[in-house]
Image: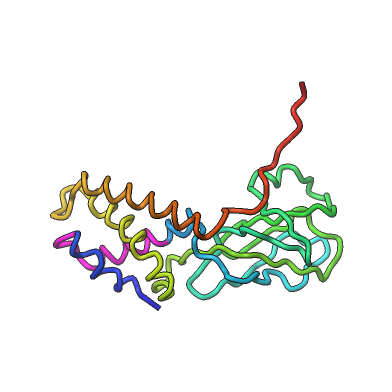
Amino acid sequence: MKTWADFVPKIVMFAADCPHFTIEEEAKRAAIEFYRETRAWRSTLPVTLVAATVASQASYTVAPPEGLEMVGLPAVWLDDVEIAEARPGDVNDITPIETGTRHSVLLTSGTTIRLIPPTVTAGRVIKAQVAYTPTEAAAGIEDAKFHEHLETIKHLALSRLKYMQGKPWSDPAGARACEAEYQRRALDDGAAAGPVRRNRLRTRKQVI
């Protein structure tokens, strides 16, 4: 694993006199934001989130890998049937006692999910392709992710460092250039990872 300190030699040459601990903190913040926005860190295979559902239970706690939290579910299955990743507003379409056969899964926190509506049948399996981001307490990121996304994360961290006012490394023009380069790279990285979610946008019939 690469620690946040491993970002320092890649960044400090572009932010002269910046303390190393400041660079480490900005690298961590940049990595968290990048992976949260792009969902570029994904499980390669479907992950079992719930091994067996409980009848009428909606919320379940999930244990992500150490140092990571969930930020999205690009693809979800209930048993062998692909279902939708819910959006926060979808909970308003379900009454507290409603059950049914058309389900979706809402990510309610980095470690919890909610099945909408709850299933009346116990023992069902929820699997998903999971998008992750480092937690605040994470010591760093995997070697492969470091090498794959170093330049993207570096440009976001540099933009924030250069936007700091009154510092020897302040450079508003340079910050804007780094920000633009980050946006370009993040868009490419997100596209390479795949769609944010595979489900079509929810639509309603229009009354004419």
Number of marks in the rendered image:
0
Image location of residue 41, percent across then percent down: 50, 65
Residue 89 pos. (x, y %): 65, 43
| Residue at 29% across, 73% down | 5
Q: Quadrant of the N terminus?
A: bottom left
Residue 127's spot in the image, x, y percent? 70, 67
Residue at 39% from the left image edge and 64% from the top image edge: 149
Q: If the image is split into quadrants, where does the C terminus sit? A: top right
The quarter of the picture where residue 60 lies is: bottom right
Of residues 142 and 54, the one nearer the viewer is 142
Tell whether position 39 is magenta.
Answer: no
Compared across the picture, whether 101 is left or right of 183 comes to right
Can you give x and y, in whole percent of width and height, for residue 93 in the image?
A: 74, 42
Residue 16 within the magenta-colored segment of the rendering: yes
Q: In terms of depth relative to the viewer, which is nearer, 96 or 77?
A: 77
Nearer the observer, 161 or 188: 188
Furthest residue toward top = 208
Q: Which residues are magenta?
A: 15-31
Principal secondary structure, stretch drawn in magenta: helix
User: Is 206 drawn above or below residue 17 in the view shown?
Assistant: above
Q: Nearer the viewer, residue 19 or 103?
A: 103
Residue in the image at 81% along x and 52% along y: 102
Please name the residue shown 43% across and 74% down the image. 144
Give the color scheme: rainbow, by chain, secondary structure or one colour. Answer: rainbow
